[in-house]
Amino acid sequence: MKERTLAIIKPDGVSRNLVGEVIRRIEGEGIRISAAKMIRMDKDQAKGFYQVHEGKPFFESVTDFMSSGPCLVMVLEGDDVIGRYRKLIGATDYKRADEGTIRRDFATDIEKNIVHGSDSVENAKFEIKYFFSELEIF
């Protein structure tokens, strides 16, 4: 089933010059990038994006981190793209991620784990609309 998902290369991935490697792996899996732009969220924008986690112990630190530098936000498209991309990036806790996944290979911390990927169709719709208008998606 054709789906869309939001992917983010987080500030640690951008600052460590991993953008090209992440994109290479995405495209190597046959996943199409239908929109992309470099952004820098302020704290309020990060809080809005992560509103589903408000009240959790990591909310302040993750929103601080996500607003600490530029990110590359992308819309990915393809058959079962949510599941395929999440398999490619690996578990949130990079120590539990499978060998060869982006997080296992490059993450340094549970929050500084290089990438974000939507975890459901509903969240993907919210997250994509948070950063992109339909006019920006090709």
Image (tube, rainbow, N blue to C red):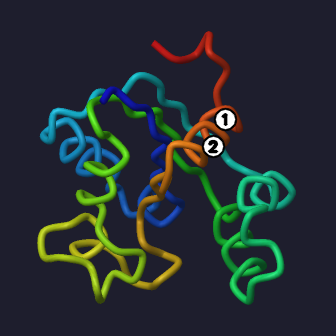
Which one is nearer the viewer's eye here, 131 or 13?
A: 131
Q: Report helix, strand or loop for mark 1.
A: helix
Residue highlighted by disc 2: 127
Horizontal and vertical percent for residue 56? Answer: 75, 83
Q: Quadrant of residue 66 in the image?
A: bottom right
Measuring 46% from the left and 40% from the top, which residue is drawn there? 5
Marks 2, 1: nearer the viewer: 2
Horizontal and vertical percent for residue 59? Answer: 74, 77
Which one is nearer the viewer's eye here, 73 or 17?
A: 73
Residue type marked 2: Glu
Measuring 34% from the left and 74% from the top, which residue is drawn there? 91
Measuring 47% from the left and 24% from the top, which residue is drawn there? 35
Residue highlighted by disc 1: 131
Measuring 63% from the left and 41% from the top, which residue is drawn there? 39
Residue type marked 1: Phe
Question: Distance from label 2 to label 1 (Cα)?
Answer: 7 Å
Within-10-Å neighbours for mark 1: few <14, some 14–19, many 20+: some
Indicate which disc residue 60 carries. none
Looking at the image, is 43 positioned above or below residue 41? below
Q: Report helix, strand or loop for mark 2.
A: helix
- Quarter of the figure that contains the N terminus: top left
Do labels 2 and 1 touch, CB within 8 Å? yes
